[in-house]
Image (cartoon, rainbow, N blue to C red):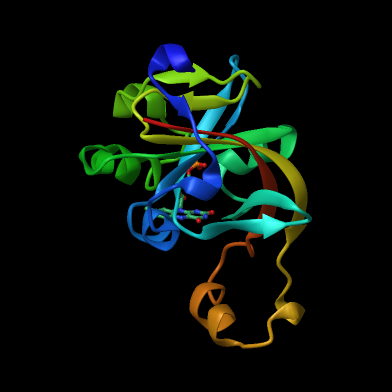
Amino acid sequence: MEKLNFTLTDPAKLKDNLIRMIASDWMLVTAGTKEKFNTMTANWGGMGYLWNKNVVFVFLRPERYTYEFMERSEGFTLTFFDVQYRDALNLCGSRSGRECDKVTETGLTPFFTDSGYPAFTEARIVIECNKLYATQLIREAFTDQDPLNTHYRTKGGLHKIYIAEIIKCWTR
Ligand SMILES: Cc1cc2nc3c(=O)[nH]c(=O)nc-3n(C[C@H](O)[C@H](O)[C@H](O)COP(=O)(O)O)c2cc1C
């Protein structure tokens, strides 16, 4: 990764505001292998500390194509981009890898981390993660009905939450 001008960084020392980075700037969640992988835009999730590990958590609806890759993979990457890649993130958040090749459509350049996880050279931050825990959200567990009524009233499954350990964080 040094060859790509990424510097190994302690995730606890990231200077960015994490809420803004995830909620407003968005990220790509990418999983799979060299043979086949997929990526999608996400802006629900977070980073924190759990079980004495630095972790991320992301939420994927089971109908996403990326979900199939997340289920099969030991890990995945989160990538964060400068504003000039907003169109690429819009595309990855509105089209499915089932019906288009997002690499061709966006022009993003995939590479594979030491763990073999797919990521993109244009990213300004790459976070490599290994899955620790995954669970499907269930209606009965909501203690406030507002998210249910707002986000799960219409068709579409409840999200699955993936908690994953940050194994490496790279920045430019
Ligand atoms: C800004 C933005 C944020 C999104 N966040 C999420 C998310 O956190 N979880 C999710 O399941 N889908 C999210 N999506 C929707 C997926 O990115 C979208 O359905 C995508 O087309 C799925 O692609 P795939 O079928 O190739 O996996 C988001 C879309 C956008 C535009």
User: As rendered, which of 115 and 140 lies closer to the eye?
Assistant: 115
User: As rendered, which of 85 and 8 lies closer to the eye?
Assistant: 8
Q: Quadrant of residue 116?
A: top right
Q: Residue furthest left?
A: 84
Q: Residue at x 49, y 18 (%)?
A: 1
Q: Residue at x 63, y 60 (%)?
A: 159
Q: Residue at x 74, y 33 (%)?
A: 74
Q: Is residue 145 left or right of residue 94?
A: right
With respect to residue 152, does 134 lie above or below?
above
Q: How far from the left and from the top, in percent, is residue 62?
A: 64, 52
With respect to residue 160, does 110 lie above or below?
above
Q: Quadrant of residue 135?
A: bottom right
Q: Is residue 49 left or right of residue 36?
A: right
With respect to residue 99, does 154 lie above or below?
below
User: As rendered, which of 116 and 68 lies closer to the eye?
Assistant: 116
Q: Residue at x 38, y 54 (%)?
A: 21
Instruction: Report the quarter where the C terminus lies.
Output: top left
Q: How far from the left and from the top, in percent, is residue 107?
A: 30, 23
Q: How far from the left and from the top, in percent, is residue 44?
A: 50, 60
Q: How far from the left and from the top, in percent, is residue 169?
A: 53, 35
How many marks the image carries: the answer is 0
